[in-house]
Image (spheres, rainbow, N blue to C red):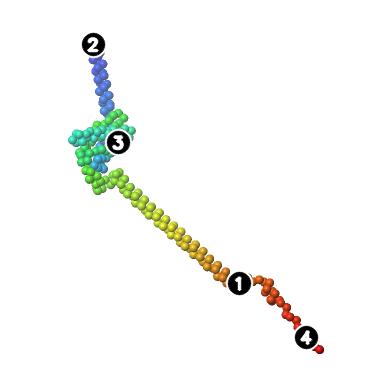
Amino acid sequence: MAYLPIYLNSAILVLFRCDICLVGANRPPAPVNITVTQLKANAATVSWDVPEGDIIIGYTISQQRQDGQMQRFIREVNTTNRACVLWDLDEDADYIIQVQSIGLYGESQASKRIHFRTLKETDRFPSNSSNQDDPTVQGIKNRQLQTGEMIIIVVVLIMWAAVIVLFCRQYDIIKDNDSNNNKEKAKPSSEHSTPERPTGGLLRSKFQKAPSINIIEV
């Protein structure tokens, strides 16, 4: 009976180690191809790849300044994203990041350490081709396009308004000319009309009987 606790402790230790081995075997592999793109003075985008054949439900990103002044952990689950935007970075500063995948049975080992350096404030929008797909740059381009479209629409509306005003003026001028012509045509007919005379006098003078003269011979 004295050896029973020893046997129990040994069995528990063996089971615990087996659980550790099973959990370790079911953990997902570490992310690969870690890249940092779209660098700005206070932001950057981290992207990575995950080996096929494993179920990944999230990720964890460890972000730390190289001088050790600040460390931050970003954790997101129930997502299939393979990229993350890092905000609130210091300009012209060195950072080190590592990415871990989150599976159904735990987290993977940390990826390789990736070093990057943020830009200065004056280099926020570099003119290289790698940042042409930057959401910030794309937003500025879209706003410029929208502004140009609005200017074109306003110019077209102004032109239409000017055409309508000219048409209305021409219509009023034509209408005034027609009314003046009608008035001028009405005046000659009234001036050359013969005045009315009483018909009674005309009839009496026209049908007046000549005086009769009777001659008597002796």
Which residue is painted at 22% across and 33% down in the image?
71
What is the CA distance from the residue labelled 2 to the residue labelled 3?
Answer: 52 Å
Question: Which amino acid type is shown beneath numbered disc 4?
Answer: Ile
What is the CA distance from the residue labelled 4 to the residue labelled 2?
Answer: 200 Å
Q: Residue 172: give x, y in percent of width and height.
A: 47, 61
Residue located beneath label 3 in the image: 52
* Contact between labelled residues 4 and 3, with CB atoms less than 8 Å apart: no
Determine which quarter of the picture holds residue 111. top left
Sequence order check, earlier mark of 3 and 4: 3
Disc 4 vs disc 1: which is toward the camera? 4
Position of residue 204 in the picture relative to residue 10 (left or right) = right
* Contact between labelled residues 3 and 2, with CB atoms less than 8 Å apart: no
Tell me if mark 2 has few (under 14), some (14-19) or many (20+) residues whose alpha carbon lies within 10 angstroms of its own: few
Residue located beneath label 1 in the image: 194
Position of residue 37 in the picture relative to residue 180 (left or right) = left
What is the CA distance from the residue labelled 3 to the residue labelled 1?
Answer: 114 Å
Sequence order check, earlier mark of 3 and 1: 3
Residue located beneath label 2 in the image: 2
Question: Which amino acid type is shown beneath numbered disc 2?
Answer: Ala
Sequence order check, earlier mark of 4 and 2: 2
Nearest to the observer: residue 73 or residue 176:
176
Disc 4 vs disc 2: which is toward the camera? 4
Q: Secondary structure at mark 4?
A: loop
Q: Residue 211: give x, y in percent of width and height.
A: 73, 80
Question: Which amino acid type is shown beneath numbered disc 1?
Answer: Thr
Residue 154: mark: none
Residue located beneath label 4 in the image: 215
Nearest to the observer: residue 123 or residue 201:
201
